[in-house]
């Protein structure tokens, strides 16, 4: 099972992620911030509350939003290409 081990907020809607499979890189989530849970993250102060929840193994925000680590890794690979 894939997990996010560490992250760093880089500014705007960008995060540096470290996965337990050894993958690392920057992901920009600006295009993903829509819908009831994610629209509040368009506020950069709210987005900056991102942190790793080690129990869930992924990124969560203060409003309770989270993204699956598999989705995050896929976005990282897509954006790196």
Image: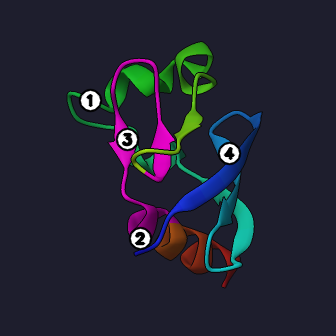
Residue 59, percent from left and from top? 50, 44
Q: Which mark is residue 37?
A: 1
Residue 54, percent from left and from top? 52, 45
Q: Quadrant of residue 33?
A: top left
Secondary structure at badge 1 equals: loop
Give the spatial CA distance, label 1 vs label 4. Answer: 18 Å
What residue is shown at x 69% (from left), y 77% (from top)? 23
Front label number (1 vs 2) = 2
Give the spatial CA distance, label 3 vs label 4. Answer: 15 Å
First in sequence: mark 3 or mark 4? 4
Determine whether label 1 and label 4 are within 8 Å by CB.
Answer: no
Q: What residue is pinned by disc 4?
A: 14
Secondary structure at badge 3 equals: strand
Give the spatial CA distance, label 3 vs label 2. Answer: 12 Å
Q: Is residue 23 above or below residue 40?
A: below
Q: Is residue 79 above or below residue 53?
A: below
Give the spatial CA distance, label 3 vs label 1. Answer: 9 Å
First in sequence: mark 1 or mark 2? 1
Q: What residue is pinned by disc 2?
A: 70
Residue 3, percent from left and from top? 50, 63
Residue 21, percent from left and from top? 62, 80
* Magenta highlight on residue 62: yes
First in sequence: mark 2 or mark 4? 4
Secondary structure at badge 4 equals: strand
Q: Residues within 10 Å of mark 4 (few under 14, many from 20)?
A: some
Residue at the farthest bottom position = 81
The quadrant of the rendering that contains the N terminus is bottom left
Front label number (3 vs 1) = 3
Which region of the structure is painted magenta? 57-72
First in sequence: mark 3 or mark 1? 1
Front label number (3 vs 4) = 3
Horizontal placement of 46 versus 33: left or right?
right
């Amino acid at each position: 099972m894939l997990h996010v081990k560490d992250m760093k907020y880089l500014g705007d809607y960008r995060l540096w992620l470290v996965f337990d499979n050894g993958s690392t890189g920057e992901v920009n989530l600006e295009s993903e911030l829509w819908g009831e849970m994610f629209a509040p993250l368009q506020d950069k102060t709210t987005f900056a509350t991102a942190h790793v929840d080690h129990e869930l193994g992924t990124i969560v925000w203060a409003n309770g939003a989270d993204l699956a680590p598999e989705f995050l890794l896929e976005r990282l690979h897509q954006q790196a290409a």
